[in-house]
Image (cartoon, rainbow, N blue to C red):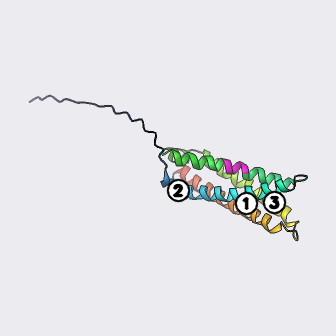
Amino acid sequence: MSHSVTIRTQTVTSSSTAVIINTGYLKTWSGVFKLFELALGIVCVTIIATRIGTYQHYAYVADIFFLLMTTTFLVGTFILLLSCLISLSTSSILAKSIYELLYHSIAFGLYLAASLTFIVQVSNLKGYGEYSILMVAAVCGLVNAVLYLLSTIVALRTYRGV
């Protein structure tokens, strides 16, 4: 017995202007770490930029190094977080590439170096009025370095498929 089968295909196109936000990414360890790295980066940049803006006639090398590193990784982390929130596929594709592993490991090393250098410089200011707020920025920098280390570990596990 033979019978005939009719197959119909239909192409549907959609032109929606709605922006879909991948809020599920913020429920992952990678998303949580990036969010906290961003928040602590804002605190660090605000404090050190205010210090450099207040004392325009001089700035220590440690201040400039700390400002450069915090600003660099604040912008980089913001772009990474934004791209993972806006695109549904970016978070899964980017996590499997080596980019996040390299980014977070370099951020960890440079943030740690900048924070330790800044702590040494701030410890010389003990007794001055700005000591406590600068120490807050330095400790936030160290905590951020630890967050970048944890992000490196998560990125390594994701990259290797563990």
Secondary structure under the numbered disc 3 in the rendered image: helix
Main SS class of the magenta portion in the image = helix
Which image quadrant is residue 34 in?
Answer: bottom right
Q: Which mark is residue 16?
A: none
Between 56 and 127, the residue placed more toward the observer is 56
Provide residue 62's location: percent of width, then percent of height: 84, 55
Which span of residues is magenta-colored? 71-75
Provide residue 21's location: percent of width, then percent of height: 49, 49
Q: Earlier in the sequence, mark 3 or mark 1?
A: 3
Provide residue 99's location: percent of width, then percent of height: 61, 45
**What separation in Å lies between label 3 and label 1 (alpha carbons)?**
9 Å
Q: Earlier in the sequence, mark 3 or mark 2?
A: 2
Q: Which mark is residue 118?
A: 3
Instruction: Specify few, some or many for label 3: CA neighbours under 10 Å numbering under 14, 14-19, or 20 or more.
Output: many
Residue type beneath disc 1 = Gly
Badges 3 and 1: C-beta atoms under 8 Å apart?
yes
Number of numbered discs overlaid on the protein picture = 3
Q: Name the residue that disc number 2 marks.
A: 26
Q: Is residue 20 above or below residue 30?
A: above
Residue drawn at x 80%, y 52% as measured from the top left: 65
Q: Is residue 6 left or right of residue 20?
A: left
Question: In the image as oriented, which residue stretches furthest toward the bottom?
Answer: 127
Residue drawn at x 80%, y 68% as measured from the top left: 132
Q: Quadrant of the N terminus?
A: top left
Q: Name the residue that disc number 1 marks.
A: 141
Instruction: Specify few, some or many for label 1: CA neighbours under 10 Å numbering under 14, 14-19, or 20 or more.
Output: many
Provide residue 152's location: percent of width, then percent of height: 62, 54
